[in-house]
Image (cartoon, helix red, strand yellow):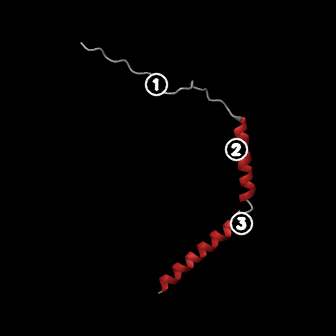
Amino acid sequence: MSATPEPVERVVRSVSPPSVPKPNPEMSTIGWLVFIGLLFLLVPLLPVIAVVWGISKVTGFLARQTRGGM
């Protein structure tokens, strides 16, 4: 007769005790500051990005038109 093995509970191989998740307001503040900084940098660049995107679309369209006519 063989003994049936018991299921193993969750095993964590670590030298430090498990920690309980908790909010970290300092990191949240830093995240918001980075986000606001990116907004201040990128929002003024949006018109330039839109113009470059529009020019690339127009030149791509014109290139397809001229290739198709040959």
- Which residue is disc 2 drawn over? 31
- Which residue is disc 1 drawn over? 11
Mark 3 vs 2, N-terminal side: 2
Question: What amino acid does circle 1 point to?
Answer: Val
Question: Is 30 on the left-hand or right-hand side of 67?
Answer: right
**What residue is drawn where x is 37% and y is 18%?**
6
- Which residue is disc 3 drawn over? 47
Q: Is residue 66 above or below residue 50?
A: below
Mark 1 vs 3, N-terminal side: 1
- Which quarter shows the N terminus? top left
**What residue is drawn where x is 51% and y is 27%?**
14
Residue 27 position, x and y percent, is 70, 39
Q: Residues within 10 Å of mark 2 (few under 14, many from 20)?
A: few
Residue in front for this viewpoint, 13 or 49: 13
Question: Is 11 on the left-hand or right-hand side of 18?
Answer: left
How far is disc 3 from disc 2 in space, using C-alphas? 26 Å
How far is disc 1 from disc 3 in space, using C-alphas? 54 Å
Residue 41 position by quadrant: bottom right
Question: What amino acid does circle 2 point to?
Answer: Gly
Residue 48 position, x and y percent, is 70, 68
Mark 1 vs 2, N-terminal side: 1
Residue 42 position by quadrant: bottom right
Question: Is 33 on the left-hand or right-hand side of 3?
Answer: right
Query: How many callouts does the rendering have?
Result: 3
Residue in front for this viewpoint, 24 or 64: 24
